Amino acid sequence: MAAIIVRDKTLFQCANCGATFPRWFGRCPNCGSWNSIEEIPLLIKNKGRKNVHSETSTIISLSEISSSLNFRIPTKIAEIDRLLGGGFVPGSVTLLAGEPGIGKSTMVLEILNALDSECVYVSGEESYEQIKLRANRLGINNSKIQIANETKLETIIHLIENHSANFFAIDSIQTIYSDEYSSASGSVFQVREATSNIVDIAKKTNKIVILIGHVNKEGNIAGPKTLEHIVDCVLSLEGERNSNLRILRSLKNRFGSTFELGLFEMGEAGLVELIEPTKVLISHSSVNSSGVAFSAFVEGARCLITEIQSLVSNSSFNIPQRSVNGYDYKRVQMILAVLDKKIRLNFRSYDVYINITGGIFISDPAIDLAIAVALFSSLNDIVIPNQTAILGEIGLTGEVRNINAIDKRVKELERLGFKKIILPKSSKNQLPKKINSELIFVEKVGDAFKMLFG
């Protein structure tokens, strides 16, 4: 029989896309990211030509498997439960990512406190006393929450496997390391292997695990891209530094929708659910100012009202400035091009600034027309009539296109006191019969300007 040959080999892996290479590159040949290639160890074992007999896998008929997906563990925090589709699924691993100081640890502590069961908080970043100070600030003194200060992977795996608790939180995955690998904690290899092992033990024991993860300077989740593929759910906690608003988005959910978001407000007592988010998303002091328009956007099953602010001013630069906060920059460029070509509005010598208030980013094209009206209002210094909302997507030919969930948007706008609503003409047959607000249907962008400003 041939002797066992064990030798160490070095590979290089991209922290962004996970691609591996035999040598180091300054720029990843696969995804193009710079300075993302890291060295990883690889242990190769050669057992000669000896036959290896694998263990037989257990095979079960699909009809005999009892589904536990209908059984979820709710957190009793409505925003989180709705985001997850009703609660956490047993055996699932959820990655909660966000910038430092955004409130990830605070949110996890509040989730553990809301659960009516024994749970374990594993911290690799804070001491027992520091965690207690955070809990005191949040008003949490729950004997069911147990704290472990650990960063070694093997110890954490043993804890999950043998502890009676069914819910575990690990803060953070970047601090976990294994002695089996020579690379430092937080490296691509350590993060990937730690996550993979934690997912395996969660599936075997049917226990729920939340992993807290950091984001890099580009705003992407730190670690290999494969990290997002390994876990069951990926949640992103976002927010502006100068705003108390916190937005929890679902980037991946194997057991529910990825089009939902949860809204919270950061206060002295921690993160609080926003029951009426309009108070935060709309600045009532700017209602009678030119360049301000209101619209409604949909995220999953939720309809929210937003305020669009625009400023058009004479440019002192050879190339006019364009600044967009909270919406797709290229889409605003398209709207400006349509207004230039179809309405003959010249923005070429003006600086243009667009801001979505509240620090939220909107990807719903239904606010296109509201942005166009806000630009027209600012350019001509005309105030949009009070209690007016504008809905509609703009096409390249200047037409106002239909949008989804039009009935839900109209009902929400009416509930919040908007008396006049500009709508796409093609949505006329999709609206509920009993609407007290005045509905104005337009076919072209120019029609909206005529209806509002004469």
Image (tube, rainbow, N blue to C red):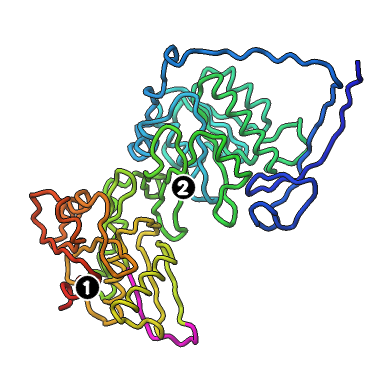
Give the quadrant of the C terminus. Answer: bottom left
The numbered mark at residue 237 is: 2
User: Neighbour class for label 2 at 10 Å: few (<14), some, many (≥20)?
Assistant: many
- In the image: residue 100, left or right of residue 33: left
Q: Secondary structure at mark 2?
A: strand
Q: Secondary structure at mark 1?
A: loop
Amino acid type of the residue that numbered disc 1 sits on in the rendered structure: Asn
Q: At which x and y percent is residue 310?
A: 34, 72
Q: At which x and y percent is residue 274?
A: 32, 47
Could you say which quadrant of the image residue 18 lies in? top right
Q: Where does the magenta region start and end?
A: 309-319
Question: Is 314 in the magenta?
Answer: yes
The numbered mark at residue 267 is: none
User: Camera-side residue: 97 or 449?
Assistant: 449
Q: Which residue is mark 1?
A: 288
Could you say which quadrant of the image residue 300 lies in? top left
Amino acid type of the residue that numbered disc 2 sits on in the rendered structure: Leu
> In the image, what residue occupies the spot 17% across and 77% down?
453
- In the image: residue 356, left or right of residue 406: right
Q: At which x and y percent is residue 278?
A: 27, 55
